[in-house]
Image (cartoon, rainbow, N blue to C red):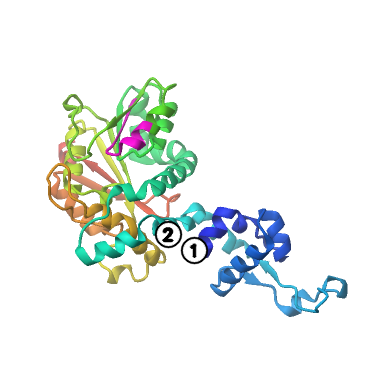
Amino acid sequence: ATALGVASRTGLLAALTEEPLTAAAVAVRAGVAERYCKEILAALVCGDVVLLQSKDEAAPSAECLPCDGAEVLRYYLPAERKAALDGMGMYFEELPLLSQCAFDDVCEAAKTGSGVPSGNYKTFGAWMGKLADQKYASQLTQFFLPALEGGAVVAALENGGTVLDLGCGEGAACRLIAAASPAAKVIGVDIDEASIAKASAYSDKLANLEFVVGDASNISNRELLGKVDLVLSFDAIHDLTDPIGAMQTARALLKPKEGVFAMVDIRAASSLRDNLSHSMAPFLYTVSLMHCMPQGLNCSACTGKQGPGLGMMWGREAAMSLLKEAGFGTVEVVKLEFDAFNDVYLCRAAPKTDQ
């Protein structure tokens, strides 16, 4: 994981091609030092990520051999493997960064059962902002929003509807929605003051966009209750110390009949045994260990009690149970073809028969 993270950040992964290349050639393409390039490639080859050209295929000419007669190794990525790695993008940097932020604290918390302070994750938060920018820019307004409720959500926003993002971070999603739907009112809420400060700094030119510091479990603006067309939550609920409270907030904000809460969260089962065949499970459980679960085990500012520590892999069954407990009358789980990581839980306050 660490070598993949370094290869991603330095551009080495992107420099590899279907055509076998020497370490020197890869180093030039990536703009890295050749000695570092060789060591990174060695780790990736031994990890069966990058492939070595066979000796028979290489058959270098005499003038290509180094003076000591050693073999000149050539490295490549088949097209399908390269496409899969490109699809992971910045995610390869996630575990090394989380270890840098919180390794010692997670080890200590494992002994005490406590959470890890959110202040440990400032660097990670900035990285998540970049990841969100990258992901949302290619998907959010082009594919995600139009896919919700057969386009009805987009129509509501175009007609002056209100959308609120719970746990908006630095506001990447909010900015894109506000720009794409100038008639809509867009509100981003996050408990982290630094994130909201950055989000607000980017939003000066969008008159329909507002950012607010607030706890997702206890929205202070009572005027919004029952008046929001779309409440969004992107991979945020499982990190919270009061997830039920946040779900209840989302329900209270929605217009009673037509309002929709779109909760995006990791596609997984709640049972470990049912996740054994999940190809990304080791990675996702480890991210949860290093960030999501410790964040959820902190004490809630609203209740004063330690959170449940749902973790990233809380799964569909637990999510459905908590959404029902929060009072949602209708919950539909939707798989979007352009997102292999997440499910979308489309939740309405009223039962379907009441709509």
Identify the residue at the far right of this view.
63
Amino acid type indicated by mark 2: Leu
Asked whether 188 falls inside the magenta stretch, the response is yes
Residue at horizontal 40 percent and vertical 36 percent from the top = 173
Nearest the eye: 58 or 140: 58
Crowd tier of the residue under label 2, counting other residues whose Cα lies within 10 Å: few below 14, some 14–19, many 20 or above: many
Residue 292 against residue 150 in the figure, above or below: below
Asked whether 38 falls inside the magenta stretch, the response is no
Distance in Å between CA atoms under marks 1 and 2: 7 Å
Q: Earlier in the sequence, mark 1 or mark 2?
A: 1
Amino acid type indicated by mark 1: Thr
Residue 17 percent location from the top left of the image: 67, 60
Residue 16 sits in quarter: bottom right
Q: In screen coordinates, is 114 left or right of 313?
A: left
Q: In screen coordinates, is 40 left or right of 128?
A: right
Q: What element does badge 2 sit on?
A: helix
Crowd tier of the residue under label 1, counting other residues whose Cα lies within 10 Å: few below 14, some 14–19, many 20 or above: some
Q: In screen coordinates, is 10 left or right of 225?
A: right
Residue 2 percent location from the top left of the image: 49, 63
Q: Which residue is mark 1?
A: 2
Residue at horizontal 49 percent and vertical 41 percent from the top = 138
Residue 10 appears in the figure: yes
Residue 211 sits in quarter: top left
Do tag 1 and tag 2 residues touch (Cβ < 8 Å)? yes
Residue at horizontal 43 percent and vertical 51 percent from the top = 337
Residue 198 percent location from the top left of the image: 40, 33
Q: What element does badge 1 sit on?
A: helix
Please give the range of residues in magenta: 185-197
Residue at horizontal 35 percent and vertical 27 percent from the top = 157
Nearest the eye: 344 or 308: 308
Q: Which residue is mark 2?
A: 95
